[in-house]
Image (cartoon, coloured by chain):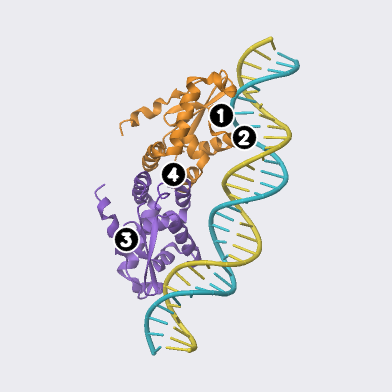
Chain colours: A orange, B purple, C cyan, D yellow
Amino acid sequence: MAAKASHFNMELFFQALGDNTRLRLLNLMGDQEICVCYFVEILGQSQPKISRHLAYLRRAGIVEARREGKWMHYRIVMPSNIGAAQVFHQTLAWLKEDKAMQSDRAKLTKACCSPATFVALQGAPLPIPNESLVSLEGK
Amino acid sequence: MAAKASHFNMELFFQALGDNTRLRLLNLMGDQEICVCYFVEILGQSQPKISRHLAYLRRAGIVEARREGKWMHYRIVMPSNIGAAQVFHQTLAWLKEDKAMQSDRAKLTKACCSPATFVALQGAPLPIPNESLVSLEGK
DNA sequence: CCAATACATACGTTTTCCCGAATGTATCCC
DNA sequence: GGGATACATTCGGGAAAACGTATGTATTGG
């Protein structure tokens, strides 16, 4: 029944990474689970646009969503395919080196420290560490 | 003068990898310099199509070409950006694990051993090891 | 139950990508 | 120089992607 799950679609995987908005989203997720409203606030782009890109990443199998009341939290999930996981992990590390990506992360940290100063984030849930990634921290 | 070479376009990089034909081409190059006619023969696709994808890879800065008489040899070049190089190297290793990619490589080996049996490859120059990648062989 | 919030999806348009077919260019050989 | 070979580029059409706008759905609070 799970016979065809073995072959991973590399083309689709890289296409998912071939968009700056999606790279920014992945960078913000990093090793945390994050609420959609933060993405909208930090990227400064329309909510439907963010939502569509998140759906794209979900279809590509590299993020998952979890509902918590009104809010949706997105987190990175490592592909089961080993090669994909290695490339993906390396990519996330690469994102951390990028200036623009660091800037996004800084904004996120700032927004989390004082969400009250962002009108759109009143009462929004804070990011939550993504436990499924902890095992990879060492490398 | 080389002031703006520092920022690598990640989006473009991943877009270049987001096409199966281009992934197959990169896989065939692997660690050798290869003549265009082999690509056409092994992928079984039109010469203009192959040529366009090679041009795409060249624009993305991950392959380079060298002319030798009538023939054009293509080879992989590692991006100067360290993060990109790491992801790229890992990607090439991943390609080697893929069944379909291994099949392409097998066809290439076969074609190189007896190019005379492939009408289109009469007198075509054999692949040449890509020396610029040797330093990375260890990892 | 109703309004408000948070997010997802549908729709129509514009842009981008990919292709086959045709044409252009460089090199070799006679 | 002229034809043949190897490859690159151009052109036009069709498919997919990306976007803004509008609308739908789930949840909360009153």
- Answer above or below: position of C10 versus B63: above
Give coordinates of residue A120: x percent, y percent: 59, 24
Secondary structure under badge 3? Answer: strand
Mark 4 and mark 2: span between their CA atoms? 28 Å
Mark 4 and mark 3: span between their CA atoms? 26 Å
The amino acid type, in three-letter code, at marker 3 is: Gln
The amino acid type, in three-letter code, at marker 1 is: Glu
Mark seen at residue A48 = 2
Secondary structure under badge 2? Answer: helix
Secondary structure under badge 1? Answer: helix
Respond whether the residues carrying marks 4 and 2 are from the same subunit.
yes
How crowded pointer 4 is (Cα within 10 Å; few <14, some 14-19, many 20+) is rated as: some
Mark 2 and mark 1: span between their CA atoms? 13 Å
- Answer above or below: position of B80 versus A63: below
Mark closer to the observer (2, 1): 1
Q: Nearer the viewer, residue B17 or B99?
A: B17
Residue sitting at 46 percent across and 53 percent down? B20
Query: Is the Cβ of the residue at disc 3 closer than 8 Å to that at disc 2?
Result: no
